[in-house]
Image (cartoon, rainbow, N blue to C red):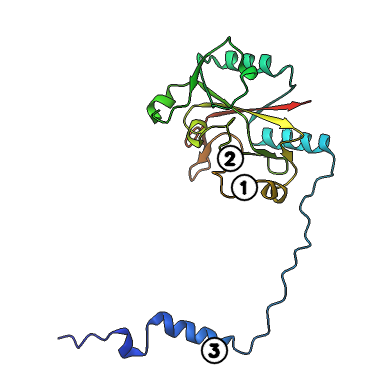
Amino acid sequence: MTGPVRNARDTGGSSRDRILARVRTAVADAREAPEVTRAYLTTHTPDDPAAVLDLLHENLAEYRALVHRTDAEGLPALLARLLAEHGSSTVLVPPGLPQEWLGEAGPVHVQDRSTSTAAELDTVDSVVTGCALAIAETGTIVLDGGPDQGRRRITLVPDHHICVVRAPDQVVASVPQAMARLAPTRPLTWISGPSATSDIELDRVEGVHGPRTLEVVLVTG
């Protein structure tokens, strides 16, 4: 037969209270914690836009993104070629994507609608977006849901994502530099290469949680 059940008050407070009391006793005579040093480097890359762009290109490719370079004048032709090479008959277009990027010819333009289902988005061949920033040291593209990027889901469901990065304005060297320019209240998506995962044997599988193919266009001038 079991005895009476004791509540926390019968045992001198809850377990949490007793543990915290012991912690306070243990640190009662401890010295004040030293001031945290914030004089660390915010980047390990030379302050050279060309070198930063080259590093971004290298790290994007390391993550298996397909990287292309062009100037503003050559961008429409390059995008048209990439969509044609992918065999895209439809392309999802965010509401604020500059019209001159895609022109009138080529795949059918699909507008992002709030009523679009995941199944409908999955039928789209490609999506073309801009970005908020690109980080050279980590090979990362950051989206913040701006007008030329659209909602997060349109870059997760279609299997082919082409992202345009305008250099040098949208390229930073490091994560600390990026954080200083990004608004924490916006829906940030950080992309380092195409979607990928691996099992316990480290067999890489792409396209599980997002686009199987990520193409990044670095635009200068």
Secondary element at image label 1: loop
Please state, as top left, top right, bottom left or bottom right, where the N terminus lies in the image: bottom left
Q: For this rendering, which residue is in front, 10 or 200? A: 10
In the displayed structure, 23 sits above or below 116; it is below
**Image quadrant of residue 145?**
top right
Secondary structure at badge 3 equals helix
Kindly indicate whether the residue at mark 1 contacts the one at mark 3 (C-beta within 8 angstroms): no
Query: Residue at 38% across / 27% down in the picture?
Result: 119
Q: Earlier in the sequence, mark 2 or mark 3?
A: 3
Amino acid marked by disc 3:
Thr
Residue 71 lies, in percent from the top left, at 76, 21
Q: Is residue 180 left or right of residue 18?
A: right
**Label 2 vs label 3: CA separation?**
47 Å
Measured as percent of width and height from the top left, residue 77 is found at 67, 14
How packed is label 1: few (under 14 Cα within 10 Å), some, or many (20 or more)? few
Name the N-terminal-most of marks 1 and 2: 2
Question: Does the CB distance between marks 1 and 2 fall below 8 Å?
Answer: yes
Residues under labels 1 and 2: Cα distance?
8 Å
Q: Callout 2: helix, strand or loop?
A: loop
* Residue at numbered disc 1: 183
Q: Callout 1, which amino acid?
A: Ala
At a point 76% along the width and 37% down the height, the residue shown is 55
In percent of width and height, residue 210 lies at: 50, 34
- What residue is shown with label 2? 144
Query: Measured from the top left, where is residue 155 in percent x and y?
Result: 52, 32
| Amino acid at pointer 2 | Asp
> Which of the two marks, 2 or 3, is nearer to us in this view?
2
* In this picture, residue 67 sits left or right of residue 199: right
Closer mark to the observer between disc 3 and disc 1: 1
User: In which quadrant of the rendered view does residue 80 lie?
Assistant: top right
Q: Report which residue position mark 3 lands on.
A: 25
